[in-house]
Each structure stands twice: as structure tokens, then as C-alpha cells.
Amino acid sequence: MPIRSAAAASLLPAADPVGRPPSDARTAFRDSLSVGMGFVPLGLAFGALVVQSGLDWWWASLSAAVAFGGSFEFLLIGLVVAVAPLASVAVAAFLVNVRHVFYALSFPLHRVTGRLGKAYGTFALCDEAYALASAEQARSWTGPRILWTQFFLHAYWAGSATAGALLGSLIPEGATGLDFALTALFTVLALDALRDLRGDLPTPLLALLSALAARVVLPGQMLLVAFALFTAGLLARHSMTARRPSRA
Amino acid sequence: MPDTTYAIATVLVAAAVTWALRALPFAALAPLRASSTVQYLSTRMPAGIMIILVVYCLHDLPVTEVRAVAPLVALAVTVGLHLWRRNALLSILGGTTVHVLLTSTVFTA
């Protein structure tokens, strides 16, 4: 019953770190605020789109709280409206979210203790949580601080999706382009991560080339191909630089 | 309109697949954590992955049409604001506002 435990686990980080000093929650709130606020326009757009597509408002809340994967949820609206078979939904979810496999390489889950903590830490491992917790400045973050940050991001997303669905009808007709919030969010996270690299230019260049190559070669599977190319490129570069000292 | 049971089932299916993709690789990759290769990857992947996600967001950019200007201007505003003030909220709101204004008024599809 993975689903029921997922829903249950989502309630737990609030209870789990409670015995510890409250500063974890407070610092996590501050950590989550800037990026998390990027969720708000996006969540509003998602909720509004759900209602505009003819689905009930609570479906936006359910999807935001339980599926919790922003980009796929936008896609899911279309699948539900088209009454796509559940197998198709599963395949689409796999293809869009398979990128998360790569996050296990650097997300600091080893600092999160307890089965419930780890369950929630992986359940709420969205792109933004990965970016925040894997950044250089997060090296000192404790497990509870990581979980609290994820919890706040989760709460912003579910809250703004619900608000968007309830207020959807108030958004003026013809106002479009709110979806850019997702692009802006990733842009900001990319710039912050780039600063951690301190002038390591080949890495962003390799990522950019991988993305563009994937876009041209296999646009339908762009994310998967781009991540695979990028990882392969980094591995090749590492094996070349690692061998160099022995040659000298 | 799809019936309620089906609409709930889609969310549960999506959640199960997504959670599996997020959780299972940790078990598979745990023994590799100490390797220098994984450490090399883990310092470089966050920046690269975010860049790939930005390109992905812009992947249906109509490069041959004038309305491609809106996301590009908004992107420039986001980057400019962020390099200037390093305030994520300001950069995201600024870029998104510019995009909404441009697509809703100047470059209506």
C-alpha cells in the first residue's frame, strides 16, 4: 500500500522533528521561502487550469499533495480530461519523472534518519528540494532541516494549487503566461548552482549541449536523453582528468 | 467529465510511479556513495540538471515567430535581476510578470 503510506508520511515531518530545537523548522522556513514563493504563481496557474479543464477543485489539491511533481501534474490534467487508460498515466509519469533517478546520486538522504523521515524525504524530492538540499550552502543542513524545507515546499505547492482552483474563475480571460514561473524558478536555481561551481565552465556547457542535442535528436524524450548524455559526458571527463596525474 | 473514482485513481498511479522513481535509486546507489566518481558527479550535477530543465521549459519555443520574444525577454529579465540582486523571489516574480504582460498584451497568440 505505498500510496496510503505516502499520504500518511506527508503528515509526519511536522510531528517527527518536534522534539528537537524549533530552530530547524524556523531556518528551513527561511530557506524555503525564496524558492517556495516561486511555487505560488505556478500553483495558482495549475489550480486555475484544473478548473478551466472541467475538473473539480479538490482534484488540484489532491494531485498537488499526493502526486507532488509540478511538471507532470500539468501534463496529468490533459490525460485525465482525455480519460487516458491508467497504464498510459503510469508510463507518462515514468517518462516525465525518470529524471529523479539521478537525484539519488547527490541528494543528502543519508543525513535524514528514521524510516518515516526517509520515506517523506524521498516522497517529497521535487526538483527544487533537490536543488536546495544538494547545494554547497546546504552541506551543514541537518536531517530535520532538510525535511522541514521539503515540507514547506510541499505546503506552498498544495496551498497555492488549492487557492488557484478555488479562485480560478477570477483570473481575467486572456491573461496568459503564468507558466513562465516554472522557467524562472529553474533559471534562478541554475544561477545559484552555477555560483557553487566557481568558474567550472565545461559543466554548464556540457549540460547545455546535452539539452540541445536531446531536443534535436529525440524531442519526445528530451529530458531522459539530456540527463543521460550529460551524465555520460561528466563520467568521460572524470575518467580523463583522473588518469592525467598518473601519466605525469 | 471523467468520473471521480477514475480521477482519483490517476493521481494515485502518478504518485506511486513518482515515489518509486524518487526512492528506489537510493537503495541501488547507496554502495556507490563513497566512490570518487559519484562525488565528482554530485558536485557538478545540480547546476547541469537545472540548466537542462530550463532548456526543457523552453523546448517548444517558436523560434521562427515573433512571439518567441516574450519568453526570451522574460528570461533575460530573470537572469538580469538575479545577477543584480540575488533575490530568488524578486527574480521569479519579475520575470513572470514581464512574461504575463507581454503574452497577454503585445504577443497575444
Image (cartoon, helix red, strand yellow):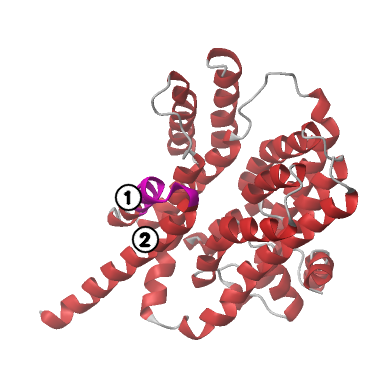
**Where is mark 1, residue-wise?**
A209
Confirm or deny contact between disc 1 and disc 2 (CB under 8 A): yes
Q: Which residues are magenta?
A: A207-220
Q: For residue A192, say whether it is visible.
A: no
Q: For residue A17, say whether it is visible.
A: yes
Dominant SS in magenta: helix
Q: Residue furthest right?
A: B4
Q: Amino acid at mark 2?
A: Leu
**Where is mark 2, residue-wise?**
A229
Q: Secondary structure at mark 1?
A: helix
Which numbered dot is residue B75? none
Q: Amino acid at mark 1?
A: Leu
Q: Quadrant of residue B62?
A: top left
Closer to us: A62 or A115: A62
Q: Percent from the top left, x then y, of residue A191?
A: 44, 46
Q: Quadrant of the C terminus of chain B?
A: top right
Closer to us: A81 or B19: A81
Q: Residues within 10 Å of mark 1 (few under 14, many from 20)?
A: some
Q: Percent from the top left, x then y, of residue B33?
A: 47, 80
Label 1: chain letter: A
What residue do we see at 62% from left, 48% from top?
A71
Residue A40 within the magenta-colored segment of the rendering: no
Q: Residue furthest left?
A: A248
Q: Percent from the top left, x then y, of residue A49?
A: 74, 35
Q: Quadrant of residue B13?
A: bottom right
B10 left or right, relative to A201: right
Residue A218 within the magenta-colored segment of the rendering: yes
A8 left or right, relative to A77: right
Closer to us: A248 or A43: A43
What residue do we see at 63% from left, 41% from top?
A38
Q: Quadrant of the N terminus of chain B?
A: top right
